[in-house]
Image (cartoon, rainbow, N blue to C red):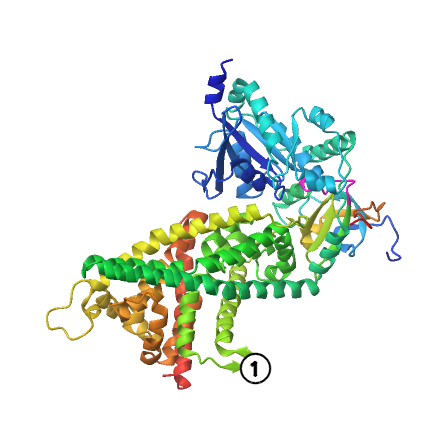
């Protein structure tokens, strides 16, 4: 974790690898997603579990351009392109719940 | 109620679930080999149905519906799932019971889907699949409470273990026996369905979370090994290197491991031809059987081992959860030419055969992405082009070392590489032409790693083998018989001096085509061979064999043909033919599949046209350049 203030509101695309955050909203106005299918994309993001209050973790970011990103949310992991990631508003930092059985095995 | 009446009535059961929930494995477990794969009426989505007979002698017709996250579809596959579940799809009866297959290791999303599916009003059974795995990872829940909350029976299944579906079968027997009347009433089409609104989706997440809490669901932990795997396999540099090494290994294996079985098939075909030769009297029937059918079908059958090995790797990688990660790694590269990372899987399959590759594009939600992937799939060097490459390389490229590599191998690699590069270029041109293109999301799930299940691999492989064998048995067999006829009739006039084929229909056709192909260095024999090569590329080798020697008692045409063409053709012609086959107007069965998948003649015609144009251009340039460098 760097010195960035916790609780800052950013888009998912600006999180770095390993960072945790809480979903605030999915932008549906098409500004970020571009066109009339924005609502379809936003709805699918909701269905996949990017709902307000969901905790997520950035697992990997592809190089170059950090596109796509791999995000773990609600027990599943999804690859999102940069623009989908930009449509998701999050609050940085979260009570990091353990996601692995560290030590076991 | 009369038990025999109940027993006599079949119950239609539909399996619904998220992608990667092990639904198909459960389907295989329930129905075993009693499956049939077809298409839904009017659309190209694969319809998998099977049946089994329960202990009460009642027969269950099980439909494996395409995996979906919700009943608001974003792909053709997902639309089918919704429409079948609603009884809206013409020609498809509405199921009477829905089995919702939930992945016990990721219950949250499955549970949300349950809440949506409940609105369908069909009798519902929830199967907690992969419950063994979930338990090993410390999962716990109150199953009775879950059943009460959902208002539906909840059973545990382990699709990959023998007997893993027994509990589900018992439940189906119980609920099916209870309510055949209810089931039939529910099976009428639902009239008042509307897709859930975003607010309802959010509400269903909240409700799912509440239920999870109420039943004391403990999220199964991921093993630390899996997390570390991802750190390595999804690393921007390390992951790419591993992917490259893996693909190299797969292709190496396809060639090396297939060698022995291919020799067995060759030997088997040869001995069959010899036996027929000895047993049959001279005449038309013998010529048709030995020269036409055995030699022709044998020259295609020989690729079965390579196709099996390639599909073995593809299915194993898919089952293990690695392929979506490969798509993640390649998304950026493929996105730069307007493709989706999801296109990786269909394109990889196309190295075996473009047909399953094109069918696999159904998982690409965006229509334009999907069409672009279909259009370039034939540029992936399919195994049918191998025999042509192998023949020409053996005849014209010296077998000598270049550094630590072999020149012949290097040329083979260059041909594969040329196909990939041209595919990217074509995709880029298509992207550039559709300037106003909309944005296409990825939203691809990266499932947990798991060991591939041998039983499921076997089912998947058997399906591919069947597709291939039907192709061999159908179109290729017909083309070989037709070619044999064309090159045997009419018989040469008495006192003719040339080879009989020169007087046949095939000879006339070849001479006519030569007008078109002379500028790129093809002689009339090649011109004839290109025609059946349209049916299936690999047939071109057999056709050349037939053309060069209508005696053709040796079914191993590729070996006997090598010295003949090595002496007969200039190097420039051979190189031009290689260049031609990088693009090679693809086989008719590919075009037929493209027509089916795109729903019209437009795309197959464009495809045939652009590939023909590129092939001609590439062959022309190659021929002229080779001539200029003294390759004549």
Is B412 drawn above or below residue B37 in the view shown?
below
Q: Label 1: few (<14), some or many (≥20) within 10 Å?
A: few
Q: Secondary structure at mark 1?
A: loop
Pinpoint residue B403: horizontal percent, then vertical percent: 56, 82
Q: Provide the residue span drawn in magenta.
A: A46-55
Pinpoint residue B106: horizontal percent, then vertical percent: 70, 40
Is B373 drawn above or below residue B162 in the view shown?
below
Closer to the camera in the image, B549 or B433 = B549
Residue B313 in magenta?
no
| Horizontal side, residue B49 vs residue B338: left or right | left
Quarter of the figure with residue B285: bottom left
Quarter of the figure with residue B590: bottom left
Residue that carries the numbered disc 1 in the rendered image: B403
Is B564 drawn above or below residue B119 in the view shown?
below
What chain does mark 1 sit on?
Answer: B
Visible in this render: residue B601?
no
Quarter of the figure with residue B627: bottom left
């Amino acid at each position: 974790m760097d010195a960035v203030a916790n609780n800052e509101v950013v888009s998912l695309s600006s999180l770095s690898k390993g960072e945790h955050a809480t979903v605030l909203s999915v932008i549906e106005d098409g500004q970020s997603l571009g066109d009339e299918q924005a609502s379809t994309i936003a709805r699918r993001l909701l269905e996949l579990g990017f709902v307000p209050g969901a905790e997520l973790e950035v697992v990997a970011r592809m190089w170059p351009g950090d596109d796509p990103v791999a995000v773990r949310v609600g027990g599943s992991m999804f690859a999102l392109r940069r623009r989908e990631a930009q449509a998701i508003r999050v609050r940085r930092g979260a009570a990091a719940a353990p996601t692995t059985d560290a030590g076991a095995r | 109620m009369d038990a025999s009446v109940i027993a006599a009535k079949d119950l239609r059961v539909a399996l619904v679930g998220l992608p990667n929930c092990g639904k198909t494995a459960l389907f295989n477990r329930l129905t075993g080999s009693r499956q049939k794969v077809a298409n839904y009426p009017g659309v190209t989505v694969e319809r998998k149905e099977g049946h089994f007979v329960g202990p009460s002698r009642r027969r269950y017709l099980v439909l494996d519906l395409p995996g979906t996250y919700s009943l608001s579809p974003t792909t053709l596959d997902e639309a089918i799932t919704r429409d079948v579940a609603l009884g809206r799809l013409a020609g498809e009866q509405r199921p009477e019971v829905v089995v919702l297959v939930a992945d016990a290791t990721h219950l949250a999303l499955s549970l949300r889907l349950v809440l949506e599916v409940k609105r369908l009003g069909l009798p519902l059974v929830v199967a907690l699949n992969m419950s063994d795995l979930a338990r090993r990872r410390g999962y716990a829940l109150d199953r009775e409470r879950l059943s009460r909350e959902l208002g539906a029976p909840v059973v545990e299944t382990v699709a990959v273990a023998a007997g893993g579906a027994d509990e589900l079968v018992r439940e189906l027997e119980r609920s099916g026996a209870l309510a055949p009347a209810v089931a039939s009433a529910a099976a009428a089409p639902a009239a008042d369905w509307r897709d859930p609104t975003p607010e309802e989706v959010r509400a269903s997440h909240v409700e799912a979370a509440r239920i999870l809490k109420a039943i004391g669901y403990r999220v199964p932990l991921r093993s630390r090994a899996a997390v570390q795997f991802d750190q390595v396999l999804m690393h921007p540099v390390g992951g790419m290197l591993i992917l490259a090494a893996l693909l190299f290994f797969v292709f190496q294996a396809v060639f090396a491991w297939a060698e022995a079985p291919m020799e067995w098939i060759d030997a088997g075909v040869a001995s069959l031809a010899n036996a027929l030769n000895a047993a049959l009297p001279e005449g038309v029937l013998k010529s048709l059987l030995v020269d036409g059918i055995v030699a022709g079908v044998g020259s295609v059958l020989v690729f079965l081992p390579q196709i099996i090995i390639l599909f073995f790797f593809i299915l194993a990688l898919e089952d293990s959860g690695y392929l979506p990660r490969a798509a993640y790694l390649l998304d950026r590269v493929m996105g730069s030419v307007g493709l989706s990372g999801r296109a990786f899987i269909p394109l990889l399959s196309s190295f075996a055969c473009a047909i399953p590759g094109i069918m696999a594009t159904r998982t690409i939600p965006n229509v334009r992405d999907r069409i672009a992937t279909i259009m370039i799939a034939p540029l992936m060097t399919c195994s049918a082009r191998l025999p042509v490459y192998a023949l020409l390389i053996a005849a014209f490229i010296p077998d000598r070392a270049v550094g630590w590599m072999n020149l012949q191998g290097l040329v083979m690699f260059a041909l594969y590489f040329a196909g990939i590069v041209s595919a990217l270029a074509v995709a880029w041109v298509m992207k550039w032409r559709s300037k106003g293109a909309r944005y296409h999301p990825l939203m691809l799930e990266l499932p947990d790693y798991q060991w591939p299940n041998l039983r499921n691999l076997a089912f998947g492989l058997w399906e591919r083998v069947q597709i291939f064998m039907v192709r061999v048995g159908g179109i290729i067999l017909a083309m070989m018989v037709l070619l044999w006829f064309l090159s045997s009739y009419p018989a040469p006039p008495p006192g003719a001096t040339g080879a009989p084929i020169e007087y046949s229909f095939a000879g006339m056709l070849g001479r006519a085509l030569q007008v078109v192909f002379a500028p790129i260095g093809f002689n009339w024999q090649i011109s004839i061979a290109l025609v059946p090569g349209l049916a299936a590329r690999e047939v071109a080798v057999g056709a050349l064999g037939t053309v060069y020697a209508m005696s053709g008692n040796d079914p191993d045409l590729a070996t006997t043909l090598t010295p003949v063409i090595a002496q007969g053709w200039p190097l420039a012609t051979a190189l031009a033919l290689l260049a031609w086959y990088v693009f090679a107007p693809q086989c008719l069965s590919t075009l037929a599949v493209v027509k089916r998948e795109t729903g019209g003649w437009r795309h197959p015609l464009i495809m045939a046209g652009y590939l023909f144009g590129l092939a001609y251009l590439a062959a022309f340039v190659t021929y002229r350049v080779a001539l200029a460098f003294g390759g004549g």
